Amino acid sequence: MNAISYYRPRNLVEALKVIHDYAGRAKVIAGGTNVLPDIQAGKVKDCVLVDVTGLDELSGIRMEGDMVFLGSLTLISDLAASRTIREQANVLWQACQVFGDPLVRNRATIGGNLAYASPAADTAVPLLLLETTLIAESLAKGRREIPLTQFFRGPGETVLAPEELVTSLFFHSTSSYQGAYIKFGLRQAMVISVANCGVLLKGTDTFQAARVGFGALAPVPLRATQTEAFLCGQVPDESVFAKAAAIAQSELHPISDLRGSREYRVMLADALFKQAMRKALA
Amino acid sequence: MDQLTESMITIFLNDQPFQAVAGASESLLDFLRHRALATEVKCGCGRGDCGTCAVLFDGRMVKSCLVLAAQANGKRVYTIRGLGRDALMANLQDSFIQHGAIQCGFCTPGMLMAAYNLLRIKPTPTRSEIRQGIAGNLCRCTGYQKIIDAIAAVAGKTAFVSEAADSLDSPNPTATDQEKAKAGYLLLGGG
């Protein structure tokens, strides 16, 4: 039986009820840029597509004090065009410029990019660097906060229960940091990263704070915490970058797949990290 | 409202109401080509890689193979055919012809849509920005240079934004469209 049906809730309460009632069979669809190819490939079948694009309350960029709040349905193109994001979360803004292609950015949502849990997801590393917290809601568990560092479990797997929906996310402004996000793909657009790297740095003479993240170099996008600890208090120069890159290697677990071999990814991690450091400090 | 394996979908296609039944997992691309017979929308890959199925959907340029037909219910959809009278699109079309930016023509509807999308947001892009603007669209004939030349020639020339383009920004169908639909001016089948 390969029956796919469709349901379009009109508000959040109705959406949560539908996802609850069809828990396990419900498949949330927003922009559809992942779900449609998966339907085409036969990976999505026998499910109820719950279309959340009618939930206007889940869309938008808002600042309160030094906190930035994003609705989970906020489009990547809106983030890419947002002055708030460019100024308060520049590393995320950079990732949104290279996400998919201009037409895909017009459909893809930030919540969808995270919930799909690709190890290569373009917004995952920047949002990890921003120490993002997600808000998930469900009828059974109500509303709970999930730090993004605890969200990903493996490729395509998250800590979300089947009846939970990511409704928003928030993080502190990092306007006093310098950041860079670099992805390496096999084409200029519509590529899944072979590897990606982001850094967020504070301090010019010595690093007062350093956040380093990698994507597509382990089963989940991750923060390289030992590399970060090493960088704090160091001066920004090439020998420090080289030592830090060597530490980063010990924190990564790249695999071989159709986009690149394990050995190739090891070299990429080294190169992308150094490039990101130079770009952030430039 | 219950979960449905198929449902009646009404879209406002190039300013005309069109209604047909669509399957729950049917893409807007399939709906446009097979139900509305809008075959100017091409299918190259059906999974978001090639861009030749681009349409203006709900005020935004998108790849129609990545949208569910059901998600388009009640929304405005413009294909390349519907934008032909728009000044910017007409200029782009002329420029593509003048620059020989077409060989087999299969990517052309999508290339024009991506170029249109770029120039509406950024009227005077650099060549590098033009490349980025069409980076999600594949062409297997021209090597892209003539397409970039054609877009660059139009960039900056259309200093005004045409009225038609302004009306495309309204996300929801106008009352007149709704009234037309209610009054039974539904085009069933046909393009």
Image (tube, helix red, strand yellow):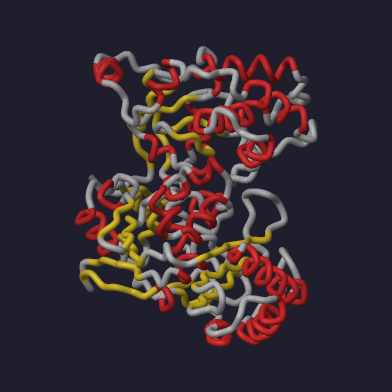
**Could you tell whether A125 is left or right of B92 in the image?**
left
Q: Against B88, is A184 above or below?
A: below
Residue A172 or A59: which is nearer the viewer?
A: A172
Residue A111 or A198: which is nearer the viewer?
A: A198
Counting labels gives: 0
Q: Residue at x 31, y 63 (%)?
A: A66
Which quadrant of the rendered structure holds the N terminus of chain B?
top left
Looking at the rendering, which quadrant does residue A194 occupy? Answer: bottom right
Looking at the rendering, which quadrant does residue A18 occupy? Answer: bottom left
- Position in image of residue A251 (x %, y %): 61, 84
Q: Residue at x 69, y 35 (%)?
A: B127
Residue B136 or A229: which is nearer the viewer?
A: A229
- Position in image of residue B18 (x %, y %): 39, 22
Q: Residue at x 21, y 67 (%)?
A: A139
**Could you tell whether A98 is left or right of B102 in the image?**
left
Q: Residue at x 36, y 48 (%)?
A: A6
- Position in image of residue B17 (x %, y %): 37, 20
Q: Against B64, is A101 above or below?
A: below
- Position in image of residue A83 (x %, y %): 41, 48
Q: Residue furthest front?
A: A205
**Could you tell whether A30 is left or right of A69 in the image?**
right
